[in-house]
Image: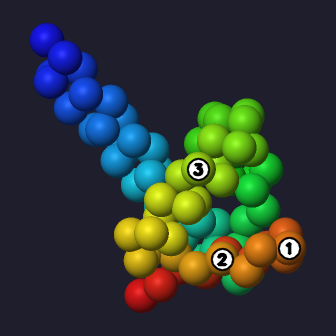
Amino acid sequence: CITSSMEEHMNQIEERKQAIYDFIDSFTREYHYPPTIREIGRGIGVHSTSMILFYLNQLIDDGKIDRKEGISRGIWIIR
């Protein structure tokens, strides 16, 4: 069924977004500075930086993070 397939895909997106958010949060708490895009990818097992950027933009749209483009560690959790 197409509907359940789309729901499954949306659930996967939400799970990946949450994993990235949790990684950014825990990394920042541990090291006192935010991770780079590549560090996020390594941390959650995604090698494509474009996929990480996709999820970061989703988190920005959700109001969960902010990002300063052009700065390698320019990601902030919004509390």
Q: Position of residue 65 (x, y in %)?
A: 52, 75
Quarter of the image where the C terminus is located: bottom left
Ranked by sequence position, the earlier of labels 1 and 3 is 3
* Residue assigned mark 2: 67
Ranked by sequence position, the earlier of labels 2 and 3 is 3
Q: What element does badge 1 sit on?
A: loop
Q: Residues within 10 Å of mark 1 (few under 14, many from 20)?
A: few
* Residue assigned mark 1: 70
Quarter of the image where the N terminus is located: top left
Q: Position of residue 31 (x, y in %)?
A: 72, 75
Q: Position of residue 13 (x, y in %)?
A: 39, 41
As drawn, is 14 to the left or to the right of 16?
A: left
Residue at 41% x, 55% y is: 18
As drawn, is 52 to the left or to the right of 61?
A: right
Q: Quadrant of residue 28?
A: bottom right
Q: CA distance from mark 2 to mark 1?
A: 9 Å
Residue at 56% x, 61% y is: 57
Q: Given the image, on which type of amino acid does mark 2 rest?
A: Arg
Q: Is residue 36 shown above or below 2? A: below
* Residue assigned mark 3: 54
Return the residue found at the far top.
1
